[in-house]
């Protein structure tokens, strides 16, 4: 089975978030996909089930232990690889079909060789945290003094979003993985996205880490599926301002630096004050390895 290793949200091999991609997965059953994902041992591996000429790209995603309904960085990696192989154009609009639904994807050429992949990511209803933050912070290896009380702690899908004051505090976190899973999973939470508005680059808007032991991933380097909701969160709580007359805003978010795998996610929000029409993420990628996997 031919497997490609692609680093997403970066153009530097070894940085960003590594994904496995199997371009021709139509003959694989679920068990085979799970075995391949375990052998690849990236946080996620994507399997392309569509054929050339299909109207949409169909993907399935697996962590080393579970199938999940959507993965941002593996989607960036897959569309990058399909474009690189000439199975998709360098630019244009496409559809993604996955377990989470059908979403728009755009390949935006940025120079003569590279394209940026833009994805409209799944958005789930925001809800109050099912766990008190006073119980969550010790499980993350942090303290309440690290929490940014000017922003709310909220849940979106299986993720808990925790705003923090300083970048050093985010870097200092060292979760107790088993205890975190035991406390969070009964409430439908499988990962914690800790972020701060104190960034490394002055042009960035947030700096983050994502701990997902409930998905079998102690820490994910760069998490596309969290940054789509984050873009909406930042608009909803006044961090990002939409034009009064309507329009779009693009900013950049940071993740992965604490793991030595810096990645950068482009965030785009469109609408007007009080009306968010669309939130999507963008990222580049680089193919690192291609080879035959025997499982």
Image: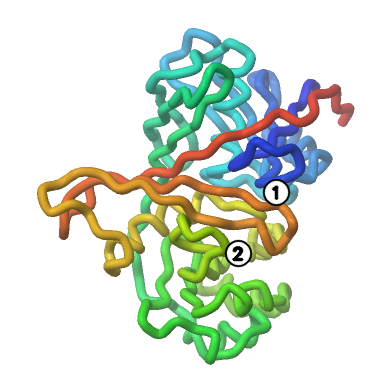
Tell me: 265 left or right of 1. left
Residue at image position (74%, 37%) is 13
Q: In terms of depth relative to the viewer, which is nearer, 236 or 24?
A: 236
Q: In terms of depth relative to the viewer, which is nearer, 12 or 272?
A: 12
> Which class describes the residues within 10 Å of circle 2: few (<14), some (14-19), or many (20+)?
many
- 159 to 11, vertically: above or below: below
The image quarter in which residue 238 lies: bottom left
| Element at label 1 | loop
Disc on res. 175: none
Q: Which residue is mark 1?
A: 43
Residue 237 pos. (x, y %) = 29, 69
Report how far apart the C-alphas of labels 1 and 2 lie in the structure: 14 Å
> Which class describes the residues within 10 Å of circle 1: few (<14), some (14-19), or many (20+)?
many
Tell me: 222 left or right of 260. left
Q: Is residue 201 visible?
A: yes
Q: Which residue is mark 2?
A: 209
Colouring style = rainbow
Q: Quadrant of the C terminus?
A: top right
Residue 15 pos. (x, y %) = 71, 46
Report the residue that reaches farthest toward the right. Answer: 294
Q: How many marks?
A: 2
């Amino acid at each position: 089975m031919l497997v490609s290793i692609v680093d997403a949200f970066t153009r530097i091999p070894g940085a960003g978030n590594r994904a496995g991609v199997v371009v021709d997965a139509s003959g694989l059953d679920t068990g085979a996909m799970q075995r391949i994902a375990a052998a690849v041992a990236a946080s996620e591996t994507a399997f392309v089930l569509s054929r050339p000429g299909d109207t949409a790209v169909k993907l399935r995603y697996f962590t080393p232990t579970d199938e999940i309904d959507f993965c941002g960085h593996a989607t960036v990696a897959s569309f990058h690889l399909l474009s690189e192989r000439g199975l998709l154009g360098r630019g244009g609009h496409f559809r993604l079909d996955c377990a989470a639904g059908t979403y728009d994807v755009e390949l935006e050429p940025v120079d003569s060789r590279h394209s940026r992949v833009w994805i409209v990511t799944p958005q789930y209803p925001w809800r109050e945290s099912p766990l008190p933050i006073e119980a969550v912070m010790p499980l993350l290896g942090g303290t309440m003094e690290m929490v940014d009380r000017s922003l709310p702690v909220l849940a979106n899908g299986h993720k808990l979003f925790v705003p923090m004051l300083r970048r050093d505090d985010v870097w200092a976190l060292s979760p107790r993985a088993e205890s975190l899973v035991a406390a969070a999973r009964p409430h439908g939470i499988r990962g914690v996205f800790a972020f701060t508005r104190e960034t490394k680059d002055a042009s960035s808007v947030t700096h983050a880490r994502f701990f997902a032991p409930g998905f079998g991933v102690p820490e994910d380097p760069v998490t596309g599926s969290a940054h789509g909701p984050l873009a909406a969160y930042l608009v909803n709580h006044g961090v990002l301002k939409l034009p009064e007359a309507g329009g779009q805003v693009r900013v950049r978010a940071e993740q992965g630096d604490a793991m030595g795998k810096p990645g950068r996610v482009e965030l785009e929000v469109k609408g007007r004050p009080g009306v968010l029409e669309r939130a999507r993420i963008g990222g580049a990628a680089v193919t690192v390895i291609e080879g035959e996997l025997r499982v």
